[in-house]
Amino acid sequence: MLKTIILPLDNNTVKELRAGDQVRITGTLYTARDAAHKRMAEALKKGQELPFDIKNQVIYYVGPTPAKPGQVIGSAGPTTSSRMDAYTPKLLELGLKGMIGKGYRNNQVKQAIRDYRAVYFAAVGGSAALIAKTIKKVEVVAYEDLGTEAIRKMEVQDFPAIVINDMYGGDYYQEGVDRYRKLGV
Amino acid sequence: MRKITYQEVVDCVATLCQEANYNLGEDVFKAFETALRTEESPVGKDVLQQLVDNANVAAAEHVPMCQDTGTAVFMVEVGQDCHIVGGILSEAINEGVRKGYGEGYLRSSIVGDPLKRQNTGDNTPAVIHTELVEGDQITIHMTAKGGGAENMSDMKMLKPSDGLEGIKNYILDIVKVAGPNACPPLVVGVGIGGNFERCAFLAKKSLFRPIGERNPDKTIANLEEELMGQINRLGIGPQGLGGSTTALDVKIEAEACHIATLPVAVNLNCHASRHQVAIL
Ligand code: SF4
C-alpha cells in the first residue's frame, strides 16, 4: 500500500512511518550533496545561519543534470547518502526531519534519526529520468557557484520513495536482505 | 598510411557520450527482462520495472537515464597503420567529451584537482586507455562510469595460497559491503592477475564485455557463472531492498602474474551499465 506524505514533515507524519513503507511525497524540499553540506558545516562553525530554515524540512541528496530547453530540471535521481553522514547528525539536531538518498547510513546517523524523530527515505538510484517527472518547480536558493551541487528548493508531486530508517530503529536494508539471504558470508 | 581526421574523432566521441547516456544497451534490457521473471521479491520486481520504465523514458526523450552521467572512460584500439591528422588523439577525445556532454545536457562531474575539488565544468579530462593493434582502424569503446558504484570497488593483493576460495570470498565480500550503495542489480567486473595497476585495469576492461557474454576460457567462464549464482543468493536484491537479483552478470579477465602475487580487483558497475563502441 502506498502512503502519501505532505512536506514539510511534522512529528505526527514521522510517527506513522515504518521501515519498508512505500510512499509518494508531495510538497517542498531542498537539495544538497557533498559540496553544499561542506559549506553548510563551515557556516555553522563560523556561527553563521544556514541558507534556508531547516526546521521540519527534507533534504534530497541529488546533483541533477542541466535542464534541456523546456524542462523544469534534468535527470535527478538520488546520490549515495553515506557521503553526507559526517554532516547529518548536526542538521538533524537543528531540526531537519527527513533525508532522501540511496544506500546505508552509519550508526551515528541512525541514532540521530531516533533521537530527533526523523526519517530516511531511499529513492531508486538510477531512475533519474522518471523521478524528474515528479519535480514541478525548481529554484536555486544558495551556493549557485557550485553548479549541480547548489542548494535548490524543489516542489515535488508524488515523488516515489521507500522508508529505510524510521524513528523506532527500523532498518529496511537489513530486513529486506535478511528475508532473501540464502548464503552467509 | 590511412588518415583519420581530428574532427572525425571529436564527432564520434561526442555521439558516443550522448548515446551511452540516453540509450541503455540491449544487453541490459534483456537482463532486466530475465530478472523480472526470476526476481522473488515483489519490491524488487517494482524496482526492476521502474528501471525499465526509466530507460524507456530516457531513450524516448533523449535525456540521461541517470543524473550521474559518469566519468567518460575510453578504451581505444589504435591500428598501427593509421594516422590522426590535425591534432593528437587524447585532445580529440577530450574535445569530443566537452562537445558531447555540453551539447547533450549531460552533467559535469569531474573536479580538476582531487584536493582543491573545483568542477572543471565540461566533464574533462576523460580517462583514456590506448592500445596499439594491427590494422588501419581506430576502435573506440566508451563507458560513462558512475561514481556510486566506482566508490564501492576494491582491490587486494591476495597470497597465492589464498587460491580460488580466497578469490571467491573476497569478491562476495566486496559485493556484500557495497549493498545498496552501488545501485544493484550490478555488473561485477573482476580482474585476476597482472600486477597492481594492471589488475584494476582488467577489472574495468571486463565491464566492456556485453552482459551474457562469457569469457572464452572455460575455467574462467565457469567461475563467472558460479559467482553469479552465489552473489544472487546474498539476498541484497534490486537497490539493496532484498531479493534474488543482486547481479545481472559477473565478468572476469585473468592474466599472467608474478610467482609471489595474486592480485584481485573488483570493479562494480551499477545497472546503468552504459557502453558504446564505434569504429573509425
Ligand atoms: S551508481 Fe549508477 S545508477 Fe546509481 S546513481 Fe551512480 S551512475 Fe546512477
Image: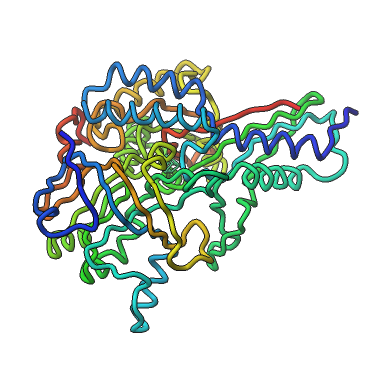
Q: Is residue B42 left or right of residue B173?
A: left
Relative vertical location of residue B173 with respect to residue A52 in this rendering, above or below: above
In the image, A133 versus B242, the foreground residue is A133
Residue B116 occupies which quadrant of the picture? bottom right
Query: Residue A104 location in percent, x, y?
Result: 27, 49
Q: Quadrant holding ligand 1?
A: top left
Residue ID at (74%, 36%): B11
Residue ID at (41%, 52%): A137
Query: Residue A171 location in percent, x, y?
Result: 16, 47
Q: Quadrant of the C terminus of chain A?
A: top left
**Count of numbered circles on the image:** 0
Relative vertical location of residue B232 with respect to residue A134 in this rendering, above or below: above
- What colouring does the structure picture have? rainbow
Residue ID at (31%, 40%): B173
Query: Residue B32 location in percent, x, y?
Result: 38, 22
Q: Is residue A185 left or right of residue A30?
A: left
In the image, B24 versus A137, the foreground residue is A137
Relative vertical location of residue A103 with respect to residue A98 in this rendering, above or below: above
Residue ID at (32%, 35%): B172
Query: Residue B215 location in percent, x, y?
Result: 50, 20
Residue B270 occupies which quadrant of the picture? top left
Relative vertical location of residue B278 with respect to residue A83 in this rendering, above or below: above
Q: Residue furthest bottom?
A: A47
